[in-house]
Image (spheres, grey):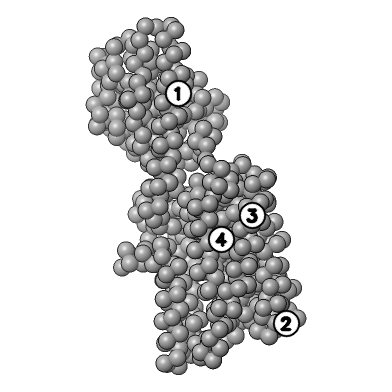
Amino acid sequence: MWKFLGKITQNLTLAIPIIMASGFVFGIIFNAQFLKGFIIPFTFLMVYPMMVNLNFQKVWEGGDTKAQILTQVINFGMVPFLAYFLGLIFFKNSPYMALGLLLTGLVPTSGMTISWTGFAKGNLEAAVKMTIIGLTLGSIATPFYVKFLMGTTIQIDFLKVMQQIIIIVFVPMIAGVLTRKALVKRYGQKAFKQNIGPKFPALSTLGVVGIVFIAMALKAKGIAASPGMLVYILVPLTLIYAFNFSVSSLVGKFFLPRGDAIALVYGSVMRNLSIALAIAINAFGKEGASAALVVAIAYIIQVQSAAWYVKFTDKIFGPPDLKEKQPEHAVAKQFEEDAEKKTTAGQEPSMVADIKKILFASDITKTAKFAARYACSIGNRFNAKVWVIHVVPDLLDVYSSEAGIIVSDEKNEFNKDAMDKAKQILKERIRQTSKQVLAEIKFCPLDEKNIIIKAGNPVEQIVKIAQEGDFDLVIMGTHGQGEIEEMVLGSTARGVIHKSRVPVLVARP
């Protein structure tokens, strides 16, 4: 079942139209009014799982304040008002469809914000924070926006809308946080991210398709009487997404570095349609089905446009530069925490006096050059061969797991591109280091042929290669130059020291 639901999650552009067609046929053949009884359970099934996977502690991490502010300006200062005015133009005589258009533009960011940012090689840490901030602010702001903008057109019970949002969003949010803490406490952070967390999005998808089916079934007879309605709904939705992509791309290109710019685009364009759908179907009685229909169609445009935008990202923002500082400390930090909880009794490495094979772990930073001198000098002293390993952190998996997203095979292309570029950088670094060292000693064992590039967790990959390759010594650097920086950024080195059976030499700058 999990595999089947996972396929649906990865193929929403196909799944949503099929579910809509099924709901339409069901609504034409049967009296669908009894389906209203399933709205509440499907709503909870849709919202609660996404809350379990969100790590709200990410909000307090700094470093991208400008990107966060610009994103929320677009999210709450531009898009909702565009949606409102387009609703006045296209749905002048269908106020609840205009409401659906407004709801589509009101609640920003979904878990897919993180995944698509990863596919486009953007700043994943910023995307995680945008998802949490946008979801929280959007949920709080929605009843005020709806009352202010739509209060004169349709009857809005402000307290009822607020009550429904508390039930739909904040109760599942609290339940999700408590569930996450309980599962992490019982199974550990690593087991939660790898084995437990990824199952929750499938449950959320089940809730989504259930609500879409119900909304379509309830509106089936109205659609049958006016079949052009679906095509007509697509026009304003397409205009909203076209505007959103254009504005966010321009703002990101002119005001932010590449990684933050990409996060801004997906942090504003990817609306939380699950929340919007839940509000539409729960807070506005039987008329809410009209609003829900608009939100359901938005799924098709949103997912398809996000996928296409990835293909043009490099043309808009330029190719990624691996030489820029990467947030790999966020990957290594978790494995450090896991390592500190475990004992290494019975796993102490034995010191090998005769060093013939050295594994030099490089992170392609400036401080790695310092460690490279040690690798070259010790290799020269012992007449040993030196292999250079660089691990491209599989950040896409890590940050997608924060939102419980099941990443598709596209991550392989994401990692391969980063690995190819890392290899080119390493070759150039080896040439430069060898020239410098040869000015002082006769032989430098660094060789362009002995380069190992891996994708995954840096600690586990370095430890694995060191052991499987029968290396006698691991040499690596550490970013840290101060106590606090060393505590955070030196976690990869400490993780390797904890887990490796091969002796480790850490060259601190």
Which of the two discs, 3 and 2, labels the residue nearer the N terminus? Answer: 2
* Kind of residue at disc 1: Arg
The crowding category of the residue bearing disc 4, from other C-alpha atoms within 10 Å (few below 14, some 14 to 19, many at least 20), is many
Which of the two discs, 4 and 2, labels the residue nearer the N terminus? Answer: 2
* Kind of residue at disc 3: Ser
Q: Which residue is mark 4?
A: 270
Task: Please name which of the two marks, 1 or 2, marks the residue nearer to the observer.
Answer: 1
Q: CA distance from mark 4 to mark 2?
A: 27 Å
Q: Determine whether the residue tagged by mark 2 lies in a helix, strand or loop.
A: loop
Q: Which residue is mark 2?
A: 153
* Kind of residue at disc 4: Met
The crowding category of the residue bearing disc 3, from other C-alpha atoms within 10 Å (few below 14, some 14 to 19, many at least 20), is many
Q: Determine whether the residue tagged by mark 1 lies in a helix, strand or loop.
A: helix
- Report the residue at 45% width, 53% height from top: 400
* Kind of residue at disc 2: Thr
Q: CA distance from mark 3 to mark 2?
A: 30 Å
Which of the two discs, 3 and 4, labels the residue nearer the N terminus? Answer: 3
Q: Which residue is mark 3?
A: 248
248 with respect to 2 (left or right): right
- Image quarter for residue 507? top left
Q: Which residue is mark 1?
A: 429
* Frontmost residue, 384 versus 337: 384
Q: CA distance from mark 3 to mark 4?
A: 11 Å
> At which x and y percent is residue 214?
47, 82
* Frontmost residue, 42 versus 420: 420
Q: Are marks 3 and 1 in contact (CB under 8 Å)?
A: no
* Frontmost residue, 274 versus 234: 234
- Report the residue at 63% width, 72% height from top: 236
- Image quarter for residue 453? top left
